[in-house]
Image (cartoon, helix red, strand yellow):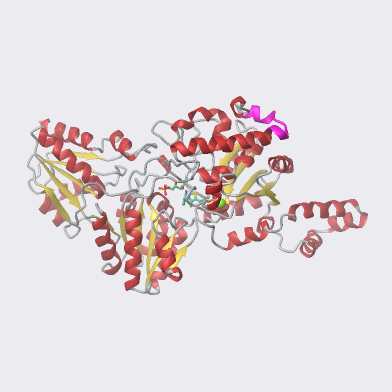
Amino acid sequence: MLLEQIHDPSDVRKLNDEQARLLCRELRTFLLEQVSRTGGHLASNLGVVELTVAIHRVFDTSQDRLVFDVGHQCYVHKALTGRRELFGTLRQLDGLSGFPKPWESPHDAFIAGHASNSVSVALGMARARTLLHQHYQVLALIGDGALGGGLSFEGLNDAGASHEPMIVILNDNGMSIDPNVGGMSRHLSRLRSKPGYYAFKKRYRQVLESSQTGQRLYSVSHDVKTALKKSLLPGSTLFENMGFTYMGPVDGHDVVQLTRMLREAKDLHCPVLLHVHTVKGQGYGPAEADPGRFHGIGPFDVRTGSGKPAAPSFSSVFGETLTRLAGEDRRICALTAAMVDGTGLTKFSKTYPSRFFDVGIAEGHAVATAAGMAKQGLVPVLAVYSSFLQRGYDMLLHDVALSGLHVVLGVDRAGLVGADGETHHGCFDVMYLSQVPGMKVFCPASFAELRTMLRRAVQEETGPVAVRYPRGGEGAYQEDRSDEAIACLRPGTDITLLTYGTLINEALSAADLLAQRGISAQVLKLSTIAPLSPETIRTALTGTERLLVLEDCVETGCVGQRVAAMMAQLGMAPRRLVLKNTGDRFIPQGSVAELRHLCGLDAEGVAAAAEEAVHEQ
Ligand SMILES: Cc1ncc(C[n+]2csc(CCOP(=O)(O)OP(=O)(O)O)c2C)c(N)n1
Ligand SMILES: CC(=O)[C@@H](O)[C@H](O)COP(=O)(O)O
Ligand SMILES: [Mg+2]
């Protein structure tokens, strides 16, 4: 196999065109074999096989800087940069990351995970190169979905006018996770339908430059050039108008043509945008037919394309409940920032299409537009992953909270998410939501509680309100005690275990373990983590000598710190306080169970910490 002889990208640079084509075929087989075993972001990677090989034929990523946007499409790059043999550990604890990680390889120029920052980062690198008098190429590889995010426009706006030599490679497959949306997406689809655009433009330049009249005309003035271009090339691209040299659209599955175009782009020494047309899932029938399902997929059977059927999850319960609520109130609208299926909104989108808005990868915009809807009398419900909502923090404060608007947030993927790792864990929302004045934060611990809390958030609340829930399903706790601000699920005398959300399952199991060790643990469950009422704290925690607070968020700003401060202010500080959380650090990838264990948030870890606290004098 040719792939087995590729130990380093320098081996790719030695390949002739025929060998490059063969390598692409082998890489597709490799991706299918590997990802079908481990799960991962398959469809996007199948789509960039030729593009990645072409990049490595032209550039040396140990020196040149290749900045991935989102980074979920980096598998081929990893396979070609000495990490092929690690694919059996993909997205597992201590294994190969599914995203670029500079600490994994010098070929990974920058960390990635969240969309739309690549042009900005690449421009920063290009500026550093120029100011430090260094000589390397800078590339940003961005998908059409990520291009729709506002940050991309800020990057393009700056980069286009910068004159910095850099190449933005736009991987346009017409898809985000779902079909791409928005005006930019339409602009791209119009460009895609003119595959001869770049070739025609090149010919037109050659013709003008070769005749004397043409040369005179071409060099007379910018106005003449622009007028000529406009008359000959109606619909010149937004990118050109921003200051980029536009190349494309080029067939993203023709490795030879791609190589040629990249070489041309490299020689231009200015901001270039290379528009590449690819097919998401290319070369694997089931993924081409259903790229959304194969965007991020668990292990599956390559022959049939089928995997484990989806189990009920907090997201699916959220979507069902919201669809039901929307049937009762015509003011209810659902919004998503490009995560229709992930947030459980597929059914809503089909049942109430006129009240469903996929705004693209634009979380800040989603929050602000929800504010506008709320101000004018609608009840907007934005379902958004916790880590992506970080993008909307200012809009939460400025556009929603300052006016006390009734915007409902379904904060999905709260807490540890598992295999996506550092960039995707929802470990910050507890802190940043709790500090928004007027924000109420509900934390369901079961599907039943999610149903009740979402109904309450939509129908009874009047200001900003968030319902936060994790990735996946519920545990053994399936009751609905959401009416109680603090529910006592188990009485005990030696120590109180206080928690919220699905960590209640770990707390209850820890109490069982402690009982076996002769320790009596009280287990309390919070329904709301913001605001926290001093009265509730006083009533629930009176007489508690030892308190352990269990949470899957960072420590600074966690509920435990707030409860402790409140208790101190009430003059009832516990004799011993233990805060169990993810700490002030980034948590790596792994299964949720492994990561809970790593952070001491599993039953065993909690029991051990509680036991130590009880035995401490
Ligand atoms: C800020 C942010 N919002 C949402 C996501 C989730 N997300 C990951 S990939 C993706 C689609 C990206 O589409 P595109 O850039 O076109 O890449 P493709 O998968 O089509 O190759 C989305 C919405 C994210 N990673 N970051
Ligand atoms: C790359 C990315 O950001 C998304 O595809 C993310 O991996 C989705 O995560 P879920 O699997 O939790 O929906
Ligand atoms: Mg795309």
Q: Pinpoint residue 344: horizontal percent, then vertical percent.
A: 38, 57
Q: Residue at x 62, y 29 (%)?
A: 9
Q: Which residues are magenta?
A: 9-19
Label the magenta part by its dominant secondary structure: helix
Comparing 515 with 370, the one in front is 515
Looking at this view, name the residue that lies furthest to the front: 303
Name the residue nearer the viewer: 138 or 280: 280
Looking at the rendering, in which quadrant would you find the N terminus? Answer: top right
Does 203 sit left or right of 292 as displayed?
A: right
Quadrant of the image occupied by residue 90: top left
Q: Is residue 245 magenta?
A: no
Q: Position of residue 126 (x, y in %)?
A: 62, 41
Task: Tell me the quadrant of the picture where the C terminus can be found.
Answer: top left
Residue sitting at x 45%, y 42%: 300
- Residue 523: percent from the left, percent from the top? 14, 45
Q: Residue 408 appears in which quarter of the rendering?
A: bottom left
Is 546 placed above or below 407 here?
A: above
Residue 585 picture quarter: top left
- Image side of residue 523 versus residue 247, left or right: left
For image coordinates 74% across by 64% down, the residue present is 234
Task: Give left or right: position of 479 versus 399.
Answer: left
Asked if one can make out residue 239 in the rendered structure from this viewpoint, the answer is: yes
The reply to whether the magenta stretch includes residue 11 is yes
Left/right placement of residue 76 relative to residue 344 reads: right
- Image location (x, y in percent) of residue 120: 56, 47
Q: Please, is residue 201 above or below residue 371 in the view?
A: above
Q: How many labels, in total?
A: 0
Residue 571 appearing in the image: no
Residue 82 sits above or below residue 116 on the image: above
